[in-house]
Image (cartoon, rainbow, N blue to C red):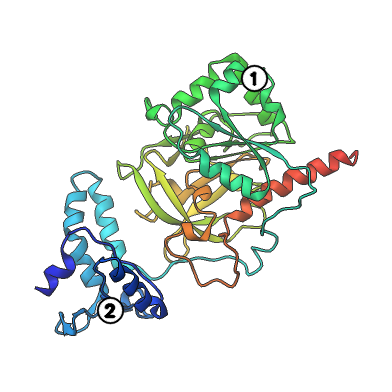
Amino acid sequence: DLAAYLFNEELAIIVEVEESHRDKIVSAYREVDVFCTPIGYSIPEYGPDATLDICVNGRQLTSQIESLIKWRSIWEETSFHLEKLQCNPICVESESQMIKSFVKSPFKWTKNLMDGVEIPRNLIALFPKLAVLREEGTNGDREMAAAFYTAGFQVFDLCMQDLLAGPADMLDAFDGLAFAGGFSYADVFGAAKGWASCILHNEKLKIQFENFRRDTRKFSFGACNGCQLMTQIGWVGDDAAAGDRKNNVYMDVNESGRFESRFCYLKIEKNNSIMLENLAGSIFGVWVAHGEGRFAFKENFTPASYSIACRFVDWMGETTIQYPMNPNGSRDGLAGLCSSDGRHLAMMPHPERSFLKWQWPHYPPSTHSSQFSPWMKMFVNAYDWCSKRKNSHSNGC
């Protein structure tokens, strides 16, 4: 039974390779007694025009070439029935329909975007110092450190206990502060609420963090749990003068009702963020991994346009609230916010897990040979922003 052979659930992997490498790879597996056989090849067409013709050992499984959408729908049908038992059924149906409407990935960025991104950085520069802050349950600190280190920062591992036990001005030593992703305190009582409480209800830490927030020579970035923390302590989404802070933003449970781990598309909006400078209008792919990522606002608060950092978009590059392209249901596709002066940036997606090309599940044909994805630019922007201030200070400005 050819269909049973192809659609069985025995342990196996499917590897996609260049046609010129196929025979070499098949031989390599067979030399170590691992069964390997070519099962097909891709065609240029995609979306509604994509087709599937199945043959095994020269025998054609289908009586005629069929639509790929049809076969994918059959393959996913059982999974979607199971999904309805653990997920919002409306979201399940939305994803089912999304499969049928796929066109192509909407990647978009300028040709010269990657100019100046290559490493090593300027070795004679006064390397800015950045602390990656973590708490019990954090799991994204290594990726965060790697992204900033690659951009040229001196990166320091800092945990909340260090701040509790250390001097009251410990954060003064750093130019930047990165709040890592993860599940601090296992999201008990809500995402980042325990972490935020450690800051807001300890007078020593509260003053130290507030001094850092107000210091115009410093910046911060939070992804996922770090974003949730920054909304809890009121560092982003403000609509007042830079000196004021209002906690107008909070994160709600995903509309799907469950944890979401997906590769989505993000459009950078025109905003004040120092890390997203010159990226407005770009559309990048990025990983998300969260259970409470839906932006919500208190009372009648609406974030100012300059504080909206990025939005989820669909296949056409348009802002979307449709699941799963918008994985959490945030209104207006909102995915990230910055402070009014642009020094503090919070995003639910994970650019620190997407700054290398190999981290993307699919990547557009590229005109640059860099190992980095366009997300590297935001970390380099932070480096350049800090370096300019350090150089100005060293020159007596």
What amino acid type should be assigned to the residue bearing mark 1? Answer: Ile
How many numbered marks are there?
Answer: 2
| Image coordinates for residue 270, horizontal then vertical, percent | 62, 54
Please tell me how crowded label 2 is: few (under 14), some (14-19), or many (20+) other residues with Cα within 10 Å. Answer: some
The residue carrying mark 2 is 51
Q: Describe residue 182's horizontal placement relative to residue 53 as left or right.
A: right
Residue at image location 33% in from the left, 44% down from the top? 255
For the point 89% across and 40% down, which residue is it? 397
Q: Is residue 250 left or right of residue 41?
A: right
Where is residue 149 drawn, in percent x and y? 63, 45
Indicate left or right for 118 with 330 as reference.
right
Residue 175 in sight from this viewpoint:
yes
Q: Amino acid at mark 2?
A: Thr
Q: Which mark is residue 207?
A: 1
In the rendered image of this protein, does residue 56 appear above or below residue 304? below
User: In this view of the protein, which residue sits in the foreground, 196 or 183?
Assistant: 183
Task: Determine the image quadrant of residue 165.
Answer: top right
Q: Secondary structure at mark 2?
A: strand
> Quick one: SS at disc 1?
helix
